[in-house]
Image (tube, rainbow, N blue to C red):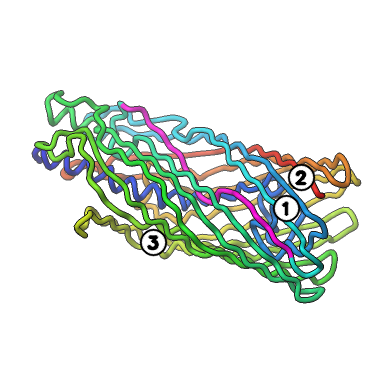
């Protein structure tokens, strides 16, 4: 394989990783929109309605509030994700520790009852996000590098109470997405160029930010004051990225020589359904549960096009639909203290042969605990903590034509800590 083809393959691998990692980001669908929900593993979220954050999960729950409610807070995500492996070409160690940096996920919510039938709400949360980072001299640079996707979901919603049993809600989502990707040449480039270009040569760089729009809806069925059930739907959101791609590889070797190349890609954040239940089974005890289903099977391929309509690359994905199941309990100790706990299982949508080290997606188990302390009838603080454990997975990735796949094993855990301040006017 000649040098020019190697460089073209390295650039293409990096470009594919850019798009793949964005979709994998959505595979890492964020639930971290409230500390109270964190403390119960986000079980029963579409039916509990214990803070103003419930309006962003199921807008129909806003009819349960009889006065304005406000909540603001953040969740701190402390992941520990490691990959291990050896280069099939040089035998170099391709292991990397702590590839996912710590992140803050803020949230803010407000609910305004208009009368006994109507309520209005607004919120800002994040439903999708990811971050992984490898050293610039990482041997498998074209599939490592830096990947970062941040989204902010700005939501406006309205709810209507039909009668004592049924409420309906509808919301509008404006999603702001900011993406950054960077890949390096890795060990193959110095080998093929006789050291002309070092391993930390920039093989790809892309930055962009765009808006996408969608909607959400919900139904709340209240059997009585102690038993209620929710059904929610969140639509697909399409984000059209028009970005500029570049690298530091000379044009004679198949790179862009630092020049930018325009391209476009539509990123589809998938639709989601959720069923939730809440049952106060005793004066001081309640159970809550959820089943969420995300339509990841929409992602069968990824395709990017250039300014003239030419195909820059195409990659089969073959995602499958994924689900999340959660179960929790709440103990109402007294007027000041409330305690909660929960467990959950997240199903990964990514087929084993499509995993990448930039986002080593895997099935995840949750265990959580939290509490609320009410200072007065108007003000309270929620705190929550969760431990998330991911299964160990094997990854096989292609870096260049004519080169054996790089083989890895990845495992990850995370600790999540959250706090919210709530106030009712």
User: CA separation, marks 2 and 3?
Assistant: 39 Å
Q: Are marks 2 and 1 in contact (CB under 8 Å)?
A: yes
- Which numbered dot is residue 74? none
User: Which residue is disc 2 drawn over?
Assistant: 422
User: Which residue is disc 3 drawn over?
Assistant: 299
> In front of the other: label 3 or label 1?
1
Q: Which residue range is magenta in the image?
A: 119-136
Residue 70 place in picture, x, y as percent: 74, 48
User: Which residue is disc 1 drawn over?
Assistant: 52
Residue 59 place in picture, x, y as percent: 67, 63
In the displayed orientation, state which residue is furthest to the front: 114
Q: Secondary structure at mark 3?
A: loop
Q: Earlier in the sequence, mark 2 or mark 1?
A: 1
Q: Secondary structure at mark 1?
A: loop
Please indicate, yes or no, whether residue 31 appears anywhere in the rendered image.
yes
User: CA separation, marks 2 and 1?
Assistant: 8 Å
At x 19% / y 57%, what residue is drawn? Answer: 308
């Amino acid at each position: 394989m000649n040098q020019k083809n190697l460089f073209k393959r390295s650039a293409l691998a990096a470009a594919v990783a850019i798009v793949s990692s964005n979709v994998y980001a959505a595979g890492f669908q964020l639930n971290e929109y409230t500390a109270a929900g964190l403390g119960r593993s986000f079980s029963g979220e579409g039916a509990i309605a214990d803070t103003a954050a419930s309006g962003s999960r199921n807008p129909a729950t806003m009819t349960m509030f009889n006065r304005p409610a406000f909540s603001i807070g953040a969740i701190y995500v402390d992941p520990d994700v490691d990959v291990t492996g050896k280069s099939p070409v040089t035998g170099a160690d391709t292991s990397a520790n702590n590839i996912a940096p710590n992140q803050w996920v803020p949230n803010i919510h407000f609910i305004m009852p208009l009368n006994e039938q109507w309520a209005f709400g607004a919120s800002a949360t994040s439903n999708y996000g990811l971050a992984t980072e490898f050293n610039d001299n990482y041997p498998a640079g074209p599939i490592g590098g830096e990947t970062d996707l941040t989204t902010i979901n700005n939501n406006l919603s309205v709810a209507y109470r039909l009668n004592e049993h049924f409420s309906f809600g509808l919301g509008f989502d404006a999603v702001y997405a900011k993406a950054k990707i960077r890949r390096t040449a890795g060990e193959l480039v110095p080998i093929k160029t006789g050291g002309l270009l070092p391993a930390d040569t920039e093989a790809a760089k892309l930055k962009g930010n765009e808006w996408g729009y969608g909607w959400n809806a919900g139904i709340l069925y209240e059997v009585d004051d102690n038993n209620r059930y929710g059904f929610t739907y969140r639509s697909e959101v399409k984000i059209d990225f028009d970005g500029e791609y570049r690298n530091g590889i000379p044009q004679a070797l198949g790179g862009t020589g630092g020049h930018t190349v325009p391209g476009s890609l539509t990123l589809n954040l998938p639709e989601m359904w959720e069923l939730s239940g809440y049952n106060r089974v005793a004066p001081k005890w309640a159970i809550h549960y959820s089943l969420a289903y995300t339509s990841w099977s929409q992602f069968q391929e990824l395709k990017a096009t250039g300014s003239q309509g030419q195909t820059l690359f195409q990659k089969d994905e073959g995602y499958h639909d994924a689900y999340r199941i959660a179960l929790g309990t709440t103990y109402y100790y007294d007027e000041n203290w409330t305690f909660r706990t929960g467990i959950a299982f997240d199903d990964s949508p990514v087929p084993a042969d499509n995993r990448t080290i930039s986002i080593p997606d895997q099935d995840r188990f949750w265990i959580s605990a939290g509490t609320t302390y009410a200072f007065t009838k108007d003000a309270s603080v929620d705190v929550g903590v969760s431990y998330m454990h991911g299964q160990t997975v094997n990854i096989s990735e292609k870096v260049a034509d004519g080169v054996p796949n790089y083989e890895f094993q990845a495992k990850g855990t995370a600790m999540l800590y959250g706090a919210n301040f709530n106030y009712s006017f």
